[in-house]
Image (cartoon, grey):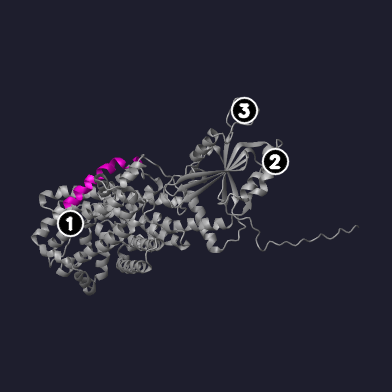
Amino acid sequence: MSSHKNLHKLSAGGLLISLGIIYGDIGTSPLYVFKAIVGDGIITTDLILGGLSCIFWTLTLQTTIKYVIITLRADNKGEGGIFSLFSLVRRRAKWLVVPAMIGGAALLADGMITPPITVSSAIEGLRVFYPNLTTVPIVIAIISGLFLIQQFGTSFVGKAFGPLMFVWFSMMAVLGSVYIFQFPEILKAVNPYYAYHILATNPSALFILGAVFLCTTGAEALYSDLGHCGRSNIRISWIFVKSCLLLNYFGQGVWLWQHQGSPLGLDNPFFSLMPEWFLIFGICIATTAAIIASQAMIAGSFTLISEAVRMNLWPKVKINYPSNQKGQLYVPSINILLWVGCIIVVLIFRESRNMEGAYGLAINLTFLMTTILVAVFLKRKKVPTYLVVLFVSIYGVIELVFLVGNMAKFLHGGWFTLVLASILLSVMWAWSSARRIKNRYVRFVEIEDYFPIMSELSDDESVPKYASQLVYLTSANFISEIESKIMYSILQKQPKRADVYWLVHVDVMDEPFTKEYKVEFLIPNKLIRIDFKLGFRVEQQINVLFRTVVEELVHKGEIDITSKYDSLRKHKIVGDFRFIVLEKVLSRANTLRFIERVIMDYYFILKKFSLSEERGFGLDASFVTIERVPLIVSVPENSELTRISYPETIES
């Protein structure tokens, strides 16, 4: 824990880690932003000054003010990201789950486009030497290698990320500065008039806006990685990063100034800044930075999914922890999903210039959703209403204008991102909606009413013993209640005699790392309830947690788990434990509305691909019994029957 706190203090190490983890995405944007702004058009004074002015003010308003100054305040016990933000405000209103899900789905879709566009942009630099080079196989090989190493944990690579990104940013600053010294007048582009002028007069203003937006796409990663680096380190390192980015952009502006009146063609202003002798080194450094940017995006996607699983916004999936480093996790299913997505992007679009249209639209949606959630957070923090309204007005307008600009790219690849984000959103929506539908049909009964019969059953030797210790997972939030299905399972569906019945309840807390439990002896030595309070970043290994609590209770002499069988008790053998998991199935005779039936059908399809309940809760399969229970025990409305009597047989 102390090392975690140290990381959040301002330190040289923390600043270096920030460079390596956070700025990959935003730091590699100079590879393609100006190329996208100029596009197939002719290089003009307006385009250069207007483009630079737009980049300067976008980085200032979006990244610096919105994210670095305002959004980083919304930390959840040191953790950031759209789901951490949602967990801070979800008690305010139920509908806030919608922006959280849209933002999360869009961020995941973006994770499939970041590696292809950054790696392609870097590798295309080789065309200076080999004009007809086909980059697709090289890009696919690099991306595949990157996804392959995820399973081993990336902490060993991570240590080198900081120094490598420092080299990258320093290189960009030096390359840009050399050109700015040749033509310092380029700095007048800081004047916002040039941004206004180009957007008001250029017929391709929407396309330019969509291209400019690419310079800020990594801003969301700044906030998502708050837990890895700490607010102070991010804020201070951003000063260095922003300076390097702007120096490079303005340097590219000078190079373009020297080539006015001609089309850009296959030239990339970024690589054109490099002297010929340095090009091969520059391309290697750019490729390394692109891989680091992709790595940061993949790691961010793993964290995002693990949070979504805990919050019941995504099917339970296997999550591995390849190293002891905090926050290091690996989600095999998402690794495959992202890898396939990246390969499809490369095969469909082939060139980085074709990917520019697909990139940006998804992250634009995440920006908008973050604005909504931050506004609710500021309101909760009792920030004056007029300031909250000002925040929403300014960023709502900026991001909606960008959205219109990005929608102009819809036919040029934007459709792909929206399709991707929609599929991911549908999974989140179906999973959380199905949970609400299921909860509507869960019937709770007063547990006290069953105390006498459970005590009697436990002592009734005419019923064969089912297990010494019988454990049920319950969703009842109050200790006075229990699901009727659990009582049905114990008393009627093959009566289950046990020495001790355990009820285990898990509450996912809004804080990230809470680990607490409470024990309630409902019937002394017969019925015990354990309530776990676990943060949304804590792995729900119920088997391990339950065993830890039982050992502690035995150690304190609060319970005795020695077997009651005479032969085993004599030798102080511990009794057996058995978990019962009740799996809900949809009966044919259900009264669901059509849309609910569709959601439940989709949910059960997703369930086939997700982890089973026992594996999701980390239970040992050899101690688990699965019981299938109908979700809804209801009688269809038209089920009335009329009894008819047979006519009496007439004796002959």
Q: Is 71 on the left or on the right of 566, as rendered?
A: left
How far separated are the C-alphas under marks 2 and 3? 21 Å
Label disc, if present, on residue 456 of the rendered structure: 2
Label disc, if present, on residue 270 of the rendered structure: 1
Q: Is 338 on the left or on the right of 585, as rendered?
A: left
Relative to the observer, which residue lies in front, 50 or 117?
50
Rendering quarter of residue 387: bottom left
| Residue 465 coordinates in the image, percent (x, y) | 65, 36
Asked if marks 1 and 3 touch (Cβ < 8 Å), the reply is no
| Residue 557 coordinates in the image, percent (x, y) | 56, 34
Q: Which residues are magenta?
A: 151-171
Label 2: few (<14), some (14–19) or many (≥20) C-alpha neighbours in 10 Å: few
User: Which residue is at a point 25% across and 44% down the rendered structure image?
Assistant: 13
Task: Pick out the residue farthest to the left.
Answer: 182
| Label 1: which secondary element | helix
| Residue 118 coordinates in the image, percent (x, y) | 26, 53
Amino acid under disc 2: Glu
Asked if marks 2 and 3 touch (Cβ < 8 Å), the reply is no
Rendering quarter of residue 528: top right
The quadrant of the image that shows the C terminus is: bottom right
| Label 2: which secondary element | helix
Magenta stretch encompasses residue 267: no
In the rendered view, would you say 32 is above or below 394? above
Rendering quarter of residue 34: bottom left
> Which one is closest to the eye, mark 1 or mark 3?
3
The quadrant of the image that shows the N terminus is: top left
Residue beneath label 3, please?
Answer: 569
Relative to the observer, which residue lies in front, 133 or 551?
551
Q: Is 375 on the left or on the right of 462, as rendered?
A: left
User: Which residue is at a point 31% across and 52% down the rendered structure image?
Assistant: 231
User: Which comes sooner in the sequence, label 2 or label 3?
Assistant: 2
| Label 3: which secondary element | helix
